[in-house]
Amino acid sequence: MSDFNLKAATQEYATRLGDDAVVLGHRLSEWTSNGPFLEEDIALSNVALDYIGRARMYYTYAAELAGNGKTEDDFAYTRDMREYRNLLIHELPRGDFAYTMVRQLLVDVFNTYYLPELAKSADSTLAGIAQKAIKETRYHLRRSHEWTLRLGDGTEASHQRMQRALESLWGYTHELFDADPLELQLADAGIGVHNAALRPTWLAQVSAILTEATLTVPKDDWAVRGGRVGYHTENLGHLLNDMQFLHRAYPGCQW
Amino acid sequence: MATDNLELYEVFVRARRGLDHKHVGSLHAQDAEQALEYARDVYTRRSEGVSIWVVRSRDICASQEDDSESFYDPSDDKPYRHATYYQLPEAVNNM
Amino acid sequence: MMTPEQNFMRKIEAEEKIEPKDWMPEAYRQNLIRQISQHAHSEVIGMQPEGNWITRAPSLRRKAVLLSKVQDEGGHGLYLYSATETLGVKRADLIAAMQSGEAKYASIFNYPTQTWADIGAIGWLVDGAAIVNQISLQRTSYGPYSRAMIRICKEESFHQRQGYELMIALAHGSPAQKAMAQDALNRFYWPALMMFGPHDAESAHSAKSMTWKIKRETNDDLRQKFIDQTVPQIEFLGLVHPDQDLKWNAERGHYDSGEIDWKEFYNVINGNGHCNRQRVEHHIRAHEEGAWVRDAMTAYNAKQRAKTTEQRQAA
């Protein structure tokens, strides 16, 4: 514990949370002009904007802690896939509308329990970011909850799409509740969150919503992990390829 | 992105506490709950409101222009209902 | 006793707005439906060329700005569909007309966005041209259209500014960035001038629209305003003006400019620009991919209603 550098660990933690937010924000932004109707298109863009806003706050804080003149954009635009530390569920493709909404439900319920814990952090910046994000998440969950009901209990076709998305995403949810030594130490220091403790409440609420939507809670018989150590799915490389294209093609420019 | 199977809702937004709700436009939604959420995303992207009403367009009864004589003209001869009808001395005219 | 037609013209001449329930000539209604829905389609199709760069925006700030701008365009499309619907048409029918090619949208969106600088050029020039037109339309005679325009103008003031700010960053950047800015200006300047439509003498709808005060200023007058205001903006960026024939005319107090390539204009209007097919196909694809979502909503709602009725009967 003696060689545990709290500041460096906090910086790493803020970067991880920034990675989660930027990658999911990016995926949601892929819906713009592709929504199932105009009102929903506009609403999805709002959710995407919330996540990009979060990414900026986390990265700005990470940059501040790094103290070497780095900016939020250095974090987003100059790190390669193996350096990214986001949880895998955020980087999976946008998929169809069912896939996007199931992912939102799983992540929104997680954030509903995670963010209030982070808001109690001894680190006032992280607590402040969480405080702001809680309000956004309350609205996000309201949307993903309602959409899950509509699509789960809508037509036979929509029900099937939802169940399929659920089966395909479920194995990525376990990682949400993992913690490596760094996160455990931060949680013990009152800065981070003991994620594992959140799973029972998460599972209870997700199950209740899925059941209400006539969907079946998948079996816990598979799990894919690796985001926090930079072991990603193939999808992230393509996402970064897109996102970082200008920085790669014109290195060192201001935009 | 058509919405042939959705309802048309009229949206009213209260810009600040103390003001009336004002009609701002309409949108399509499946139910009132969804209409409220979309109204938030569509009509208050710049914090234009503190409160939103949505009403199904087909539930609104509107006066017709042809009715306007019977609706509004009878008020024309009641100028005493308007503050400007009363001439007060300059000293107290900011009433 | 005035006829409805005389009463209508009296209102127009007295600068009173026409409201949805008022009597109006059928041709006025049709003219409005055509113009407002075309405007709405333009906003919605206009999401695509800029949307093309959302995932590639080079900073998180630019990404947030661009995303909210494209989202605004969706919102503006919605305000305008909403205004059109007050004339007794359904959005679904308007969209079907656009997808079939029967209804038009602004041709400018049939040009591809090839580089990041195009995002700057679109905000600066395309939104700039649109704003000149829209400011004038705030005084249009149809109430709901006028109110939508007022709202849109208020929201769009940031659109042009962010585009120009983006151009400043490029123009003051590396030689490659500056070249990118010049290239975008060269490609978007003329199409932006074309946005004001044909010369007044050639314009099919202009005269009637002016009499009814749907349009308040002519195509050429609005275009002139835009040409004049853009000259110092190009100078400030230190870029070369794409119009070689541009000359200050002291007598007119305006810039004289070179002739627009009208052949190109009509070619794109008639559906043969770079992206005409792509834009409509994109819209149709999104619409078709969303069909199951809309069906599910309707089915869910019907189930909920049935449940409520059942409960009521049981009680």
Image (spheres, coloured by chain):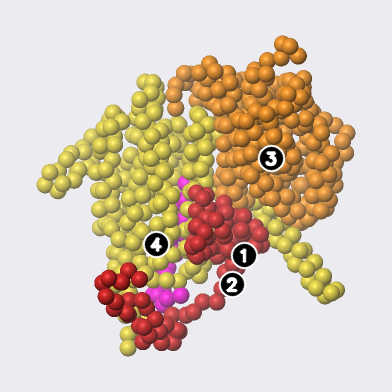
Chain colours: A orange, B red, C yellow
Nearer the camera: disc 2 or disc 3: 2
Q: Which stretch appears magenta?
A: C21-46
Residue C206: x and y, percent? 31, 61
- Residue pointed to by mark 3: A95
Quick check: is C108 in the magenta stretch? Answer: no
* C-alpha span from label 3 to label 1: 28 Å
- Distance Cα–Cα, label 1 vs label 4: 24 Å
Identified at 47% across, 69% down, the residue is C87
C-alpha span from label 1 to label 2: 9 Å
C-beta proximity under 8 Å, tags 1 and 2: yes
Q: Is residue B2 above or below residue C110?
A: below
Residue at mark 2 shares a chain with residue at mark 3: no
- Badge 2: how crowded within 10 Å, few (<14), some, or many (20+)? few
Residue A136 seen by the camera: yes
Task: Give me the disc on residue B7.
Answer: 1
Q: How many marks?
A: 4
Q: Which mark is residue B58?
A: 2
Instruction: For mark 1, give the secondary structure.
Output: strand
What separation in Å lies between label 2 and label 3 (alpha carbons)?
36 Å
Q: Which chain does the numbered disc 1 sit on?
A: B
Please indicate whether residue A106 sits to the left or right of residue B73 in the image. right
Q: Quadrant of the N terminus of chain A?
A: top right
Q: Is residue C174 left or right of residue B1?
A: left
For residue B93, above or below residue B81: above
- Dot 4 amino acid type: Ser
Residue A223 occupies quadrant:
top right
